[in-house]
Image: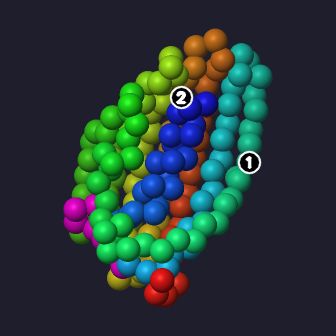
Amino acid sequence: MRILTTAAIAALALAGTAGAQGIKINPGMWTYDTTMDISMNMNGQEMDMPGQTTSESQCVTEADATFDPSQFTEPGCSISNLQETSSTVSFTVNCNQQGMTMTGDMSATVVDGGNGMDMTMKMNGNQPGMGTMDINGVVKGRRSGDC
């Protein structure tokens, strides 16, 4: 389950700092709505956890408005296939922690002149002896004003 935590942290970290070298959000008060759908197959037993949505608000400073995907990797995780445009960053994350592997694709797009951010995450993993897991996440962030 550590990788599941990593995936969630990755999603929130990306939402909280959105912006790659070529993209940047505007500093200020931001609200992020995160929806995570999780499906697991535990030794042949299907378990679905439908969309869990959480909302979080935080002040994003000028220093937080710039993003480097490597800043949220944990030991056992790596970033590859990094692609950037003036408004989008996408990459693949690969993790192998305590015998569990997880691979996924993430993408973030800055919208509304830097006052909004949309992110998607699709990950799948396997833990020997336990089963497989698929995670689909969507984060929508919007600037609501000054901090």
Identify whether 45 is placed above or below 57.
above
* Between discs 1 and 2, the one toward the N terminus: 1
Residue in the image at 49% along x and 79% along y: 29
Q: Position of residue 17 (x, y in %)?
A: 39, 63
**Residue 18 position in % (x across, y down):** 38, 64
The answer, for residue 139, to whether it is visible in the render is yes
> Which label is found at residue 125?
2
Which element carries disc 2, helix, strand or loop?
strand
Q: Position of residue 112 (x, y in %)?
A: 40, 82
Please give left or right for residue 11 compared with residue 47 in the image. left
Depth order, front residue of 70/40: 70
Three-letter residue code for mark 2 = Gly
Q: Which mark is residue 62?
A: none
Please check the rendered image and state whether residue 24 is part of the magenta-colored stretch, yes or no: yes
Q: Residues within 10 Å of mark 1 (few under 14, many from 20)?
A: few
The three-letter amino acid code for the residue at tag 1 is Pro
Query: Could you tell me which residue is drawn at 28 percent across and 39 percent down?
Result: 80
Q: Is residue 11 magenta?
A: no
Q: Residue at x 53, y 33 (%)?
A: 3
Helix, strand or loop for the magenta stretch, by majority:
loop
Residue 135: give x, y in percent of width and height.
58, 41
Residue found at the very far bottom of the displayed protein: 145
Answer above or below: position of 59 versus 74: below
Specify the quadrant of the image occupied by residue 67: bottom left
* Residue under numbered circle 1: 50
Quarter holding the N terminus is: top right
1 above or below 72?
above
Mark 1 → mark 2, Cα distance in angstroms: 18 Å
Residue range highlighted in magenta: 20-26
**On screen, 70 above or below 61?**
above
Mark 1 lies on a secondary structure that is strand
